[in-house]
Image: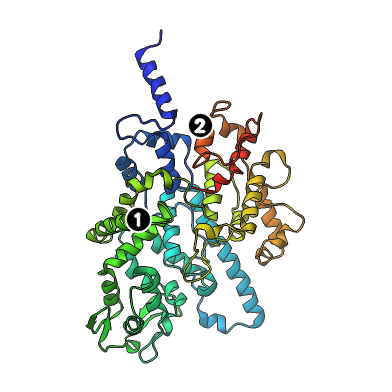
Amino acid sequence: MMSIATLRRVLMLLLLHAPGAALAAGALGFGDARHLLNRTSFAASVDDINAFATLTREQAADRLLAWTGTRVGTPAPGWVNTFESPRRVRGMSEDERKAFQREQFEKGVELRGWWLTEMLTTPSPLTEKMVLFWHNHFTSSLQKVKSPPLMYRQNLLLRRHALGYFGDMLHEVSKDPAMVVYLDSASNRKGRPNENFAREVMELFTLGEGNYGEQDIKEAARAFTGWSIDPDSGEFVFRRQAHDEDVKTVLGRSGNFDGDAVLDILLAQPRTAEFIVSKLWREFVSPNPDPAEVRRIARMFRDNRYNIKVALRALLVSDAFYAPQNRAALIKSPIDLIVGTLRQFRYTTGEVTPFLFVSRQLGQDLFAPPNVKGWPGGEAWINSATLLARKQLLERLFRAQEMPQPAAMPMNRDDGERVKGIGKLGANGKQRFMRAMMDVHFDANRWLSQFRLGDPLLARVVLAADPASPQAAGAQGVDVLRQLVLDPVYQLK
């Protein structure tokens, strides 16, 4: 006869796996837990979904936010504290400059690999998602900054503040050396103001387009004069002799403002909080923010000194976040797709170089957004070329066990040449690339062992909604899994 304790365990398992079930009043249940974890991480395991299914919305959000941190577990490249002065580069011969450029390219690849490795291994995926979010908000690009150490420092800055206080981050990133270079602050001086930073800090970082005037930009640019970078150390410096000390008028306020005072004026505008909350909404909830909800959450955001955790928590416990119409409503970015797939299915990888180039092919090159506005995201991720490349990636990954050749990329004779930039890795670049792909492995039998044969839970874990295509009759094991990841719904979250 079954004991009461055993019966309770059986009932617990049935409830956890029952569609839409919750263990107690207010508990998420399996479907909502899966939705939460796949929006706030790159992918969720069955164990994590089951653990969160027993929590309320508030408990789940609090647990996720408690797991976030600022430290990186992946060792940094050895060169990150070595800044190359532009003066030294200008004095190089042509051959020395070419060798230096190749070295910088290799450092850029290594820097991208460092961050991608952290995304793949971090115990707090939400931290990495927020660092990536801010990297696309406070955009800088290695292509213009031309210094991997400065881009590394900026990543650490965004990491420190990713779930801290937006105002503190705004002040620090505005003086960040990579940002100073990227938005030409070093050439902004009294009598010859450069308006690039002043324009972008209003349009892209705080207020949003249409909430300031051209005169506000001109006046703010004068306030930021003198913000520069030491060419020998790569550190921020304020050059007082280049600063405009006269009175400026910005958004209706007048005074002898410096750059920090202008940033405080921008933070005092209600529109700044609404602009940031709207971007967070599009990242985590849906493509179309609800104006009334945005205003409500923005008030909480401002009232709590722009505490990012307060705004994010409010989004994650909202009815809109869990609304049926907002499920499978967001398109996975290339990083979401790559990191999510590798994490979801517990792939083992060696060097992650192949996936850096896959991500670039799909339109998302880490540390190199396309322009000052960053990656547009959403439907822009998908076109005929990228959709085909996404499908090819997934086909190769899930045919790995039956193919003797590497799994991570479409494998033709000319692949090494076809992937943009691979030749810059040097004479052995293609061989290095191919060896790295050989290290990619998926243990399908082990991963599938957590599901019963024909278990409908498999599709509920892998897809954000019901599959768009019918499953082939008689498919079993990895064939079923392959059909699911090749279903169009797998591109959504």
Drawn side of residue 341 relative to residue 64, left or right: right
Pick whichever, 81 or 414, lies toward us: 414
Drawn side of residue 136 relative to residue 423, left or right: left
Q: Residue furthest right?
A: 413
The answer to which of marks 2 and 1 sits earlier in the sequence is 1
User: What label sits on residue 290 in the rendered view?
Assistant: 1
Residue at image position (49%, 63%) is 376
Q: Residue furthest top?
A: 1
Query: Badge 1, how many Cα within 10 Å: few under 14, some, many 20+?
Result: few
Residue at image position (54%, 28%) is 455
Q: Residue furthest bottom?
A: 191
User: What label sits on residue 457 in the rendered view?
Assistant: 2
Pick whichever, 371 or 240, lies toward us: 371
Give the answer, above or below, for where 424 lies relative to 183: above
Question: Where does the image place residue 190, in percent across and percent down from the top left?
Answer: 35, 90
Give the answer, above or below, for where 147 lies relative to 443: below
User: What label sits on residue 12 in the rendered view?
Assistant: none
Residue 33 in view, yes or no: yes
